């Protein structure tokens, strides 16, 4: 792995689309440049191996007295543990690093966990809200797609239409951003999740919109705003990045219609795989009630394809500095970021 040239960075998303996994939204140029203003420095790395073309976005954070923490959000784009090992083989690709964090979308199986351990990687606390997700196959025609949903989900979509709910794609202007952030705030309060400040979300919404990769959808009943979703698409893949809704008029099932109209919009643009992004994994479900439990019930109405990945793993390059980071540096950094910016670490 080596740093990308300016010309390669200019066509970064084309390189990401050529990755073994088909590309991921958190490996895009928009995501790297967005995180630059929130305490991370993007590093764009490429492979010169003709047998394994690869573009990998790493985010770097400087920790005073310790060096650099490197993190590849939803990457690198390995489709096997062997590929990941080749990507991480050159330590010189990560100058100044005391730890390199990775989260490739490899299936969470005993074999994959053993293989990652044999590479010298260690399982870490997951950075993403969940390492499991639900995937909707958008390849069938609309009638077949609708028929693939659970009966209750189909009913709710049709009910929302009959009750007069409307969904439209809207721009991420001041009005659209404020509306979506308000919906998210209501949903986050119900779930008990921390909500970052509005500029955080509007920052990447507008960047992805400007790059032609993001779209905001809002659902209304008359003049009343009920639900919203922000989706990101790259090539033939898309992700349900953010969503929110209010409890008022919940009986008209606006969130179901939002997802259906977003899927129709994505299909018209050539998207064939829609990642609903975050459901509880089996370990989380086993502990009883989970904040994502309701989302699982909602998202499972659209698909039975639930996938669980290996999550976050670490390549520790300096034991002493890594120990200091885990015991003191990381907890302190988390507290300071929340107190000063109402922001999370990652």
Image: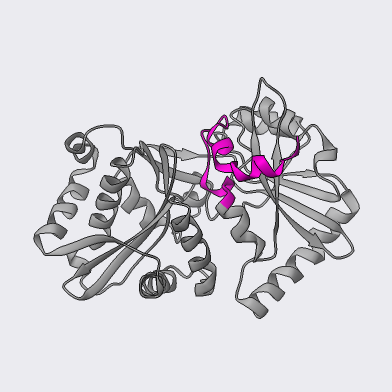
Return the residue nearer the eye: 97 or 315: 97
Residue 217 placement (x, y as % from top left):
32, 60
At a point 62% along the width and 57% down the height, the residue shown is 33
Q: Is residue 16 magenta?
A: yes
Q: Is residue 52 left or right of residue 62?
A: left
Confirm whether residue 131 shows in the render: yes
Count of picture labels: 0
Return the residue nearer the eye: 332 or 165: 165
At a point 85% along the width and 60% down the height, the residue shown is 324
Name, please, the residue furthest toward the top.
Answer: 51
Name, please, the residue furthest toward the front.
Answer: 7
Residue 225 placement (x, y as % from top left):
26, 72
Confirm whether residue 288 shows in the render: no
Return the residue nearer the eye: 33 or 259: 33
Q: The C terminus appears in which quarter of the rendering?
A: bottom right
Give residue 252's quadrant in the image.
bottom left
Q: The N terminus appears in which quarter of the rendering?
A: top right
Give residue 274's quadrant in the image.
top left
Q: How is the image coloured?
A: one colour
Q: Is residue 102 left or right of residue 299?
A: right
At a point 53% along the width and 74% down the height, the residue shown is 197
The magenta-colored residue range is 1-29
Q: Is residue 163 left or right of residue 182?
A: left
Q: Is residue 7 magenta?
A: yes
Residue 123 placement (x, y as % from top left):
69, 44
At a point 61% along the width and 71% down the height, the residue shown is 343
Residue 166 placement (x, y as % from top left):
18, 62
């Amino acid at each position: 792995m080596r740093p990308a040239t300016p010309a390669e960075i200019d066509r970064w998303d084309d390189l990401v689309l050529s990755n073994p996994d088909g590309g991921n939204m958190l490996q895009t140029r928009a995501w790297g440049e967005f995180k630059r203003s929130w305490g991370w420095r993007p590093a764009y790395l490429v492979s010169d191996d003709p047998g394994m073309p690869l573009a990998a976005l790493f985010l770097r954070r400087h920790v005073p007295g310790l060096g650099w923490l490197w993190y590849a959000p939803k990457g690198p784009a390995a489709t096997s543990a062997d590929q990941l090992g080749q990507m991480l083989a050159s330590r010189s690709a990560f100058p100044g690093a005391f730890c390199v964090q990775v989260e490739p979308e490899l299936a969470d199986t005993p074999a994959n966990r053993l293989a990652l351990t044999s590479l010298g990687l260690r399982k870490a606390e997951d950075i993403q809200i969940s390492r499991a997700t639900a995937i909707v196959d958008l390849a069938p025609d609309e009638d077949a797609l609708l028929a693939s949903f659970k009966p209750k989900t189909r009913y709710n979509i049709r009910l929302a239409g009959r009750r007069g709910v409307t969904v439209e794609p809207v721009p991420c202007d001041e009005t659209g951003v404020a509306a979506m952030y308000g919906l998210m705030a209501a949903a986050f309060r119900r779930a008990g999740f921390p909500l970052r400040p509005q500029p955080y979300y509007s920052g990447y919404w507008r960047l992805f919109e400007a790059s032609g990769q993001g779209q905001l959808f809002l659902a209304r009943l008359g003049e009343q705003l009920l639900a919203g979703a922000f989706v990101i698409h790259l090539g033939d893949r898309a992700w349900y990045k953010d969503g929110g809704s209010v409890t008022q008029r919940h009986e008209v099932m606006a969130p179901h219609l939002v997802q259906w109209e977003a899927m129709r919009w994505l299909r018209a643009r050539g998207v064939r795989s829609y990642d609903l992004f975050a459901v509880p994994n089996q370990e989380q479900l086993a502990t009883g009630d989970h904040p994502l439990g309701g989302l699982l019930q909602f998202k499972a109405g659209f698909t039975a394809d639930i996938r669980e990945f290996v999550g976050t793993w670490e390549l520790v390059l300096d034991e002493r500095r890594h120990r200091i980071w885990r015991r003191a540096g990381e907890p302190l950094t988390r507290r300071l970021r929340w107190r000063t910016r109402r922001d999370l670490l990652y």
